[in-house]
Image (cartoon, helix red, strand yellow):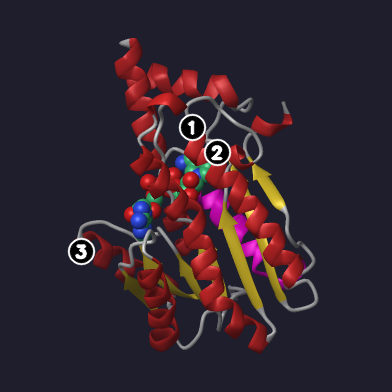
Amino acid sequence: MMMTKSLHGRVAVVTGSTSGIGLGIARALARAGADIMLNGFGEPADIEALRQEIATLSHVRASYNGADMSKPAEIAGLIEAATSELGKVDILVNNAGIQHVAPVGKFPAERWDAIIAINLSAAFHASQAVIAQMRERNWGRIVNIASAHGLTASANKSAYVASKHGLLGLTKVIALETARTGVTCNAICPGWVLTPLVQKQIDAWALRDNISPDKAKDLLLAEKQPSGEFVTPAQIGAFAVFLCTEQAAQIRGAALSMDGGWTAQ
Ligand code: NAD
């Protein structure tokens, strides 16, 4: 059977793609034919195995760069490495993100700074580093992974909610600045996805209320997500691929929910 590879010839950088949603997006973009620059933390051997898996299964080029997304100079280095190793950057997925849960009065200032740096400022620095070459070729896709928490709030997540609301603002501004070009910028706003980032919150809930992790998982979904089911990294990956197609060329500056009904309430 002939496979349609809608992104053949494109090069994608996916930040925070050694785990969870970023990895799901990297796999989906590769399956659609894009060459991939992976980024994120982890054991070198595990990351190399992922890199090889993506390259081999999808018949694309795959590289890895371990830039710390809290450091602007390393972010510039990531884009430079992708451009020199893979030839260019057509697609930038700003996905790397972290969480910390505490009331404002007890929120460590250092955690606030780290969350704003990684969840928000990194998207600015990476977008700034790619925008000129995207404009030059008159084609580009910037996909920001925001959150239901970009559209609504929850207690005890001040830095995360602020960073994700900010990321939606940045998304709109870049979309307006590129509106007359072939570059688009949009945000996906997932609800709960069962990744290490959320597993930590489930485990903390189970510990606090002395209940099983499975019970905590059910309660976590019941509290916010009407579908009662997690969104999957593969579903978000497929959505990101669609945003990179020509059919999505007039989706600009949008905050696109994929949240099991969370923000419909
Ligand atoms: P995850 O913890 O599974 O993955 C995070 C990735 O970011 C990892 O690859 C990690 O190594 C990388 N990372 C963390 N700090 C980094 C840094 N300083 N520099 C470079 N890479 C770094 O988390 P996830 O759930 O897959 O989250 C991915 C994104 O999706 C985040 O922006 C998160 O806010 C967002 N999101 C997650 C959910 C959810 O329910 N899991 C919901 C909405 C939005």
Residue 237 among magenta residues: yes
Percent position (x, y) of residue 100? 39, 36
- The 10 Å Cα crowd at callout 3, few under 14, some 14 to 19, many 20 or more, is few
Contact (Cβ within 8 Å) of mark 2 with mark 3: no
What secondary structure is found at the residue carrying circle 1?
Answer: loop
The residue lying toward the viewer, choosing from 11 and 104, is: 104
Task: Kindly identify which residue carries mark 2.
Answer: 161
Q: Is residue 130 left or right of residue 37?
A: right
Q: Which residue type does callout 2 highlight?
A: Val
Mark-to-mark CA distance, 1 and 3: 31 Å
Task: Kindly identify which residue carries mark 3.
Answer: 44
Q: Earlier in the sequence, mark 1 or mark 3?
A: 3
Q: Which residue type does callout 3 highlight?
A: Pro
Residue 242 among magenta residues: yes
Looking at the image, how many numbered discs can be counted on the residues? Answer: 3
Mark-to-mark CA distance, 1 and 2: 6 Å
Contact (Cβ within 8 Å) of mark 1 with mark 2: yes
Which residues are drawn in magenta?
Answer: 232-247
- Magenta span: helix, strand or loop, mainly? helix
Q: Which residue type does callout 1 highlight?
A: Lys
Q: Is residue 172 visible?
A: yes
What secondary structure is found at the residue carrying circle 2?
Answer: helix
